[in-house]
Amino acid sequence: MTTTKTAFSPTTSLDRIQSLDIMRGIVLFGILLMNINGMGLAGAYGDPTVSGGATEWNLTTWVTINLFFEGTMRALFSLLFGVGMFIFLDRLKKKGAGIKAANIYFRRLLWLLVFGLIHGYLLLWTGEILYDYALMGFIVFSFRNLTSIKLILAAFLLFTIGAIWNYSDYRKDVKFIEDVALVEKYKTEGIILSKELKEVDIKWEERQWKRSPDAILEYNTNMRKGYVDVLAFLAPENQHSDENWPYRYDLWDILSMMFLGIALFKWKILSAQKSYKFYGIMAGAGYLVGLSINFYEINSILEANFSLLSFSKANITYDLGRVPVAIGHIGAIMLFCKFPFIKWLKQSLAAVGKMALTNYVMHSVFSIFIFTGVGFGLFGTLLRYELLYIVIAIWIFQLISSPIWLKYFYYGPLEWLWRSLSYQKKQAFLRTAKSKE
């Protein structure tokens, strides 16, 4: 089969599904809402007692974000990535790309993996996820053509394995805390510790040190240094994540949502084609189940005063809470897409979504200048709720700047680079006067 040079060109603005772009923009903002704690505070992403405050407005912020957004934004981001890769391959297939579709697809993932490494190590973001998406994208390729039911079953299987692993970790933590108590008892009574209990003691002391004011002060001081010093300081943390997350979390956390996203897309749920009633029921049922479980988990953690075991136990039902809430968010977002009002906001959010890669990486660039010694050196100086001011400011900036940028350019700068590298051909970038929308 012969093809023209334009047969395998990237998706144009006319081919895009607006509901997905709007959803991508909303989720990107939600990702920043979650990531800001790791960007500006030491060890405070999950446990607010470590730094950033755990009382009054700080506690309210932690409870609210964990109730509605913890795990759900990452879930939806993963879901959208899976959908995006499926659409990418499906459109190439329809253009008759054949085996060339696989070449472009895998080249696209390889470059995303490189972007992820640059983002994590050079742009100093230890919570970077592009690297993980690239790895899971290689697996998605082989399963993309399964029926929606089979994809749902595969996702359920992965969720189940993840829950079993979390339960296993919880049992280990129970044993660990029991051993810690035994160590304290033996120390009080002057009994010599066994080799196993000595290791428990060392592990517990390391944990307590990392949570201590002196350790937090040391971490904050390192984060406020110059660029090279911060890069060297965070490199081991990035390496640890890249080595451990793919097999410990990505398969059950990310790949599962990619499968779920492709299934929902095949059912035309993500293109806002269902009825208002459908999405209303979807949102209501998702929130009813998910928020109930999330509330139970949060309340258990609060009652246990943020103990290690309370967090570990909450992880067992983690997906039972976050996935239904994510489903509820989808229903609510699709309703928002269908309702005929505030079109300007939808257009701005869609522009943010079209530039998701650029805007996502831009969050880390802002973080470098706001929190490290490269700029203002504010790491560890703001309370948890005060970080929300920065989040809102970045939201407003990207809502304004993204539509303006796309008025003059076809893609965001990183989107353009990614497409050019994937297709091995320089793509059109600057809009002509005739093509401006």
Image (cartoon, helix red, strand yellow):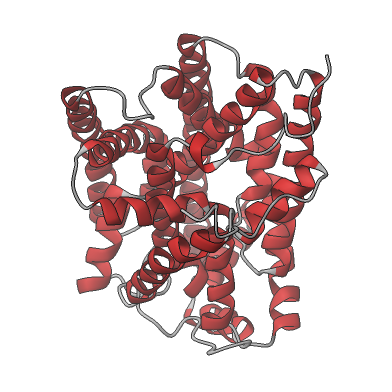
Q: Nearer the viewer, residue 59 or 92?
A: 92
> In this rendering, is residue 424 above or below 280?
below
Residue 246 place in picture, x, y as percent: 67, 40
Residue at the spot 67% in from the left edge and 19% down from the top edge = 93
Let me know if residue 279 appears in the view. yes
- Image side of residue 417 versus residue 291, left or right: right
Position in image of residue 17 (x %, y %): 44, 35
Residue 270 location, x and y as percent?
38, 29
93 vs 290, nearest the viewer: 93
- Count of marks overlaid on the render: 0
Query: On the rendered structure, is 401 left or right of 360?
Result: left
* Quadrant in which the N terminus appears: top right
Q: Is residue 116 left or right of residue 162?
A: right
In percent of the image, x 46 and y 18: which residue is there?
266
* Quadrant assignment, res 283: top left
The front one of 200 and 51 is 51
Above/below status of 284 relative to 267: below
In the picture shown, does residue 309 fall above or below 85? below
* Residue 375, picture quadrant: bottom right
Residue 112 in view (yes/no): no
Q: Quadrant of residue 202?
A: bottom right
Picture residue at 53% right of the left edge, 57% below the top:
183
- Give the image location of residue 371, x and y in percent: 53, 81
